[in-house]
Amino acid sequence: MGTEPLLLHPIRRLSRTWQLRVLFGISLIWLAPALACGSFAPRPTPTPTTQVVIGGSAVDQPSTPGDAPALATPEPQIELADTPTPTLVPTPTEVFTPTPQPGTAIAVGQPARVVAPAGLNMRQEPRTGSQLILQLGTGVRVTVVSGPQSADGFTWWQVDDGQGNVGWVAERDAETEWLSPQLGQAQPADRDPRVGDRVQVMIAQLTVRAVPGTDAPMLTRVDQGSQFTVTAGPQQASGYTWYQIRSDDGSVEGWVAAGDASTRWLSPLE
């Protein structure tokens, strides 16, 4: 039995060829997207941005979906003011001026007494031709409030008599002292008494009554030169001005009339 060479069946050959063609076609289908896009990796999604102008320059800032674009808040600039250098002012040195002791020299704020034999004129201004306010009686105690000033050959001091009168008086002339810093012993003053004053009886006898008035009950009579303290008054009754007085030991206490139109019956001591 003879041997024949093995021949492939034509139909099987064609089948093999078509199989290769089919495989090649499928490969092209898969390779086409890769060749077109360059990669099978997914493309990144672009992030939306918002332009914000800061200081004159546009800056891209990422924005979150659904949120309004945030604006950058510029930092406030603080301007520092120049602080001037303080100028040191030297403290003035106080000059100590000693106040004369009462009774040694006339000085502002100190008492003085009128010693002019005929009284002392008080004037509006420190000069002899100025308007006359009143004449201070001898022995009147005053308080020096201003001065001295020189005019018309005199040294002038402004004084207060305690009765609401303030004016200028001359200290002295070439021979006689008119205003003295030496008070000496307390003397009766030609003025109305005030509560708290030390007073002296100026007539032979002065009637002390229970209340103000000439028809009031009499308590006692006091002699000239007797001294008391004014505790109340003044009060007007029966045509007189009345003051309540009290002795140091309290044995006498009542109301007395200060005087009539021409004479003081009760004078304060200064």
Image (spheres, grey):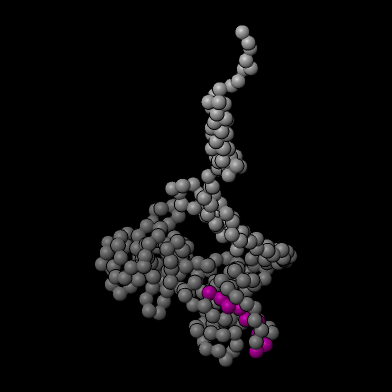
Q: Residue at (51%, 74%) from the top-left corner?
A: 161
* Residue 141 lies within the magenta run: no
Residue 201 position within the rendered picture, expressed as x and y whole percent measured from the top left: 44, 67
Question: Disc count in the image?
Answer: 0
Of 122 and 36, the residue lying toward us: 36
Of 232 and 138, the residue lying toward us: 232
Above or below: residue 165 compared with residue 200? below
Q: Toward which corner of the image does residue 148 lie, by quadrant?
A: bottom right
Residue 197 position within the rendered picture, expressed as x and y whole percent measured from the top left: 46, 63
Q: Toward which corner of the image does residue 179 lie, by quadrant?
A: bottom right
Of 123 and 78, the residue lying toward us: 78
Q: Is residue 13 left or right of residue 190?
A: right
Q: Which residues are magenta?
A: 152-160
Residue 180 position within the rendered picture, expressed as x and y whole percent measured from the top left: 62, 74
Of 24 and 129, the residue lying toward us: 24
Q: Which residue ends up furthest to the bottom in the rendered image?
A: 129
Q: Is residue 254 left or right of residue 147?
A: left
- Residue 41 appears in view: no
- Residue 42 appears in view: yes
Q: Which residue ends up furthest to the top in the rendered image?
A: 1
Q: Residue at (67%, 71%) from the top-left corner?
A: 105
Quadrant occupied by the N terminus: top right
Q: Residue at (63%, 12%) from the top-left corner?
A: 3
Residue 249 position within the rendered picture, expressed as x and y whole percent measured from the top left: 44, 52
Q: Residue at (60%, 42%) from the top-left corner?
A: 35
Above or below: residue 156 compared with residue 195? below
Principal SS element in the magenta part?
Answer: strand
Q: Which residue ends up furthest to the left in the rendered image?
A: 215
